[in-house]
Image (cartoon, rainbow, N blue to C red):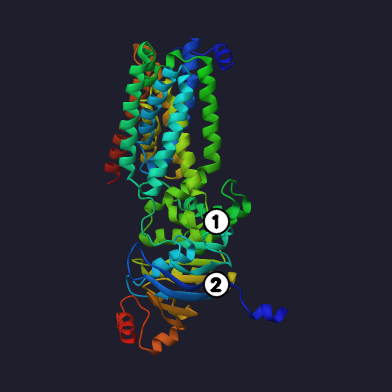
Amino acid sequence: MSGIVLAALDLPWPFEREYMQLALAAGLVVGASAPLIGVFLVQQRMALLGDGIGHLAFAGVAAGLLLEVWPVWSALVVAALGALVIQLLRRRGTTTSDLALALIFYGGIALGIVLVSRAGAGSVNVLPYLFGSILTVEPGDVRLVVAVGIVIVVSITLLGRVLLASVLDEEAARVAGLPVDLASCMLAVLTAVTVVAAMRVVGVLLVAALMVLPVASSRLLARSFRSTVTIAVGVGITSVVVGLVAAREWSLAPGGTIVLAATAVFAITAIARGRARRVAV
Amino acid sequence: MFYARAIVKDTLLEAHHLSFAYGAEPTPVVDDVSLVLRQGEFVALAGPNGSGKSTLLRLLLGLLAPASGEARLFGADPRSLRERARLGYVPQRHVLAPDLPVTVEEVVATGRLARCGWWRRPRAADRVAIDHAIESVGLTPETRRPVLELSGGQQQRVLIARALASEPELLVLDEPVAGVDAESQRLFRDSLVHLVEEHGAAVLLVSHELGAVAADLDRVLVMKRSIKFDGPPSGLEAAGVSLGVHADDLPLWLEAIE
């Protein structure tokens, strides 16, 4: 349905074609929702959680190809379970955050490679998930991404205040009886859901960039938590649009151009802020 | 009946023969501690470094489970207490989220969640309570400023305002004025006295530095693994123990009575 609606839109270049409109719709939702999760991950010093879960999602995609089920579902199940295990390992103090992530990183990618080798001829289908393939998304993909975006916005609206209280001062949040563990498990699952939704947009190898880079830029500019979130979402959306325009103009890989756009925004922000500080001094 | 209610104040916090040791340590950090804190009381818990004050606090708040004995917070086991908004807590710390842009108002609002419900948007009454908490620590002009731009003393007052935002019946503070300037200490003292006198709340203050509030305290508990003194500040002063930060007479007095 979203494809039909979008195809009817009369958008200017480079979004005049249906495939570009579908790419824009999927990209905008991911560009807006990934930083909503990233703003809490960065503060919890878990900026690389998205990367670790991305590697697990790769194993999930490979399992889906092997078992001949839609790889998005298998990726979602594996990524969500992995995210919960990481949180459990951190919470129990069994292992440190970076070791927990390393276990998931290497275990996930190794399992993915083994499963892909078992899948044989189907292994070539894994490339769109590894590197993204936003220009080939179909209306069904867009519907999934929009549904995921709604889940993320609703969840963060409900849990955002607890997550903020928790990242500011976990002990005080616990004494106040706030559901700190529930919120952190939900954050892990939402990270997995976002990774899976963003797989087709930028690929599992770059998925964490859309969670982290917009937040890195916004923290340089913002003076409140609310503005941190708003600016990060704005940077995420801008990066997607600029990246898609660049990909269309110069026939480049859109996953890469979107993340490079986000990187450029951070570099420009950091340089401009440095100059403003020097002027102030 | 009414008369009895008027003079018998509710017990908010109590401990009965509470003991705790970390891991396999043979010597308990908290050893057979019993205490009671009633509505409207302003009580300080003092003692040298390593005397078990912070551990006792964590037991009383339900963050640790006792090896033996029992703690009761508002009549319930602190670990399963449901009415958490009745309690305000200022933990021992100096830096709040060192690189997160967050305003004074946003931090204080997190202290209101236990009262207004974490899943709800704050309503008008909640905003009034948040503004009042900020005002009571003298930070109204800084309401929308990033916390990172404030001095250490001001940041500490933000944490106190956060604890006040839930309009607590009992406020527990762990070393809240360590390294804080004199002006912040004065404002800190005023906000605690206001809470006790105007709102009838109880305060349990764990601190090395009791000079600023010495005249306002109802009781002082002195601890070194167990409670060594429980009485009015005048009782300690009569024994030659002052309540200022630089006094080394408290450890000497503890050594003398042991």
Relative to residue B63, is residue A38 depicted above or below? above
Q: Give the distance between the C-alpha atoms of the residues marked 2 and 1, in whole angstroms.
A: 18 Å
- SS class, disc 1: helix
Q: In which quarter of the image is residue A34?
A: top left
* Residue at the farthest right position: B1
Relative to residue A176, is residue B225 depicted above or below? below
The answer to whether residue A219 is visible is: yes
Q: Quadrant of residue B51?
A: bottom left
Relative to residue A19, is residue B70 depicted above or below? below
The front one of B56 and A255 is B56
For the residues carrying marks 2 and 1, which lies nearer the camera in this image?
A: 2
Q: In this view, does B199 lie to the left or right of A230?
A: right
On residue B196, the disc is: 2
Q: Quadrant of the N terminus of chain A?
A: top right
Q: Which x, y percent locates residue B146?
A: 42, 50
Q: Which x, y percent locates residue A82?
A: 41, 34
Tags 2 and 1 in contact by the CB under 8 Å rule?
Answer: no
Which three-letter amino acid code belongs to the residue tagged 1? Ile
- SS class, disc 2: helix
Which three-letter amino acid code belongs to the residue tagged 2? Val
The front one of B100 and A193 is A193
Earlier in the chain: of badge 2 and badge 1, it is 1
The front one of B213 and A127 is A127
Q: Which x, y percent locates residue A70?
A: 48, 19
Identify the residue position indicated by label 1 in the image.
B130
What residue appears at the point 73 percent right and 79 percent down from the top-left corner? B1
Q: Which x, y percent locates residue A224?
A: 44, 45
Q: In this view, does A179 lie to the left or right of A271?
A: right
